[in-house]
Image (cartoon, rainbow, N blue to C red):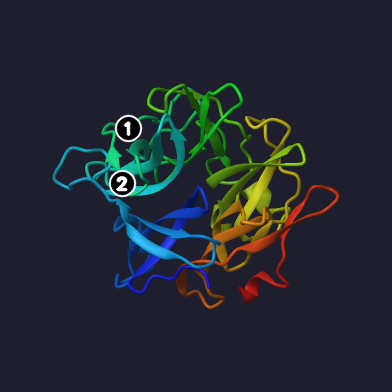
Amino acid sequence: MGLKLADKWLWDFWFVRERENYHVFYLQAPNSLEHESQRHFNVSIGHAVSPDLRNWKVLPDALQPSDANSQALDNYTTWTGSIIEHEGLWHMLYTGSSHAENGLVQRIFLATSKDLLNWEKHGQPVIEADPRWYEKLDLDVWFDEAWRDPWVFKDETGLFHALITARAKDGPADARGVIAQASSKDLINWEVMPPVTETGEFGYLEVPQIIELNGLYYLLFSVTKDIFSDNRKKRSELETGTHYLLADNPLGPYKLSRDKFMAGDEHGSLYSGKLIKNPQGDWMFMAFKNFTPTGEFIGELSDPYLVLLDQEGNLSLGLPELAEV
């Protein structure tokens, strides 16, 4: 059944489990726009709730860009994030950009809530790209300053970590994509650290997520086929979708285990995939429905699909063919 909005497209999303309910927060934009590419700069963050990941009730919107006439650095866009609870408050890290910079510079912002419904922005960005390791805006090299899609988690010592879509400061332009790392004791004050992945494969790795399975850590990411490095294009088929890296430690280093995507195809049926356990405790895969085989944008949340794990630790979907989704 999934989640389809009558008057909006939805795309990147993230989950929160609260007691028996699943909350999903997602990027949305009016489907009356002239072209789907305009959605990124006409965006707000929507919110829906479900008991089973299939039947959804839409709730009031969670966040939108700050006043366009203000000096706020998120007055143009509020993009992908994640949520964690700390000291009785829900903390949402999200991506923002400003009109003054034409949306080209991405930063990580913070909003908090007592009930997942009413959100208060922290104001200034809390994490920015550190030029010691990461590429800053240089339009001669790349089309934006990539610093987005924070995935936040807490380690066994109580320290918080954010994994972030970023680009390394050195190397071939088409191969600088990495997952950056930052750490914090309070979710407000952050220290940026070196990346947890290597360069060489892609121009970026979007919407990261970490899960642990049988003692291994899987770092999910999504990428479009036009962002493959020349080196990767020479050895693998071009796919758009969601894949993963593997490590023995949640902070890496993460390595590619195989070239074939977990969920990918030539036209990009599904994107921004996440794994989540259903009420029965099974790992499920969900993504947003992206493009049809003929190139029309869909912009809906998929139903959950069972995740298959083979003896070698490879993940796949319990679907006969991805193209049938």
The residue shown at (62%, 29%) is 251
Please give the name of the residue rendered at 61% of the width and 56% of the height, measured from the top-left corner: 279
Above or below, 226 relative to 31: above
Disc 2 marks which residue?
A: 103
| Residue 228 position within the rendered picture, expressed as x and y whole percent measured from the top left | 60, 52
Q: Which amino acid type corresponds to the residue marked 1 in the rendered image?
A: Pro
For label 1, the crowd category at 10 Å Cα-Cα, with few meaning under 14, some 14 to 19 and many 20 or more, is many
Q: Identify residue for label 1.
A: 125
State the residue in front, 222 or 156. Answer: 156
Which residue is depicted at the point 61% across and 55% down?
A: 242
User: Which residue is nearer to you in this view: 299 or 105?
Assistant: 299
Q: Amino acid at mark 2?
A: Gly
Task: Relative to 270, say whether 97 is above or below.
Answer: above
Q: Is residue 32 visible?
A: yes
Number of residues whose C-alpha sits closer than 10 Å to that of mark 2, classed few (under 14), some (14–19) or many (20 or more): some
* Mark found first going from the N terminus, 2 or 1: 2
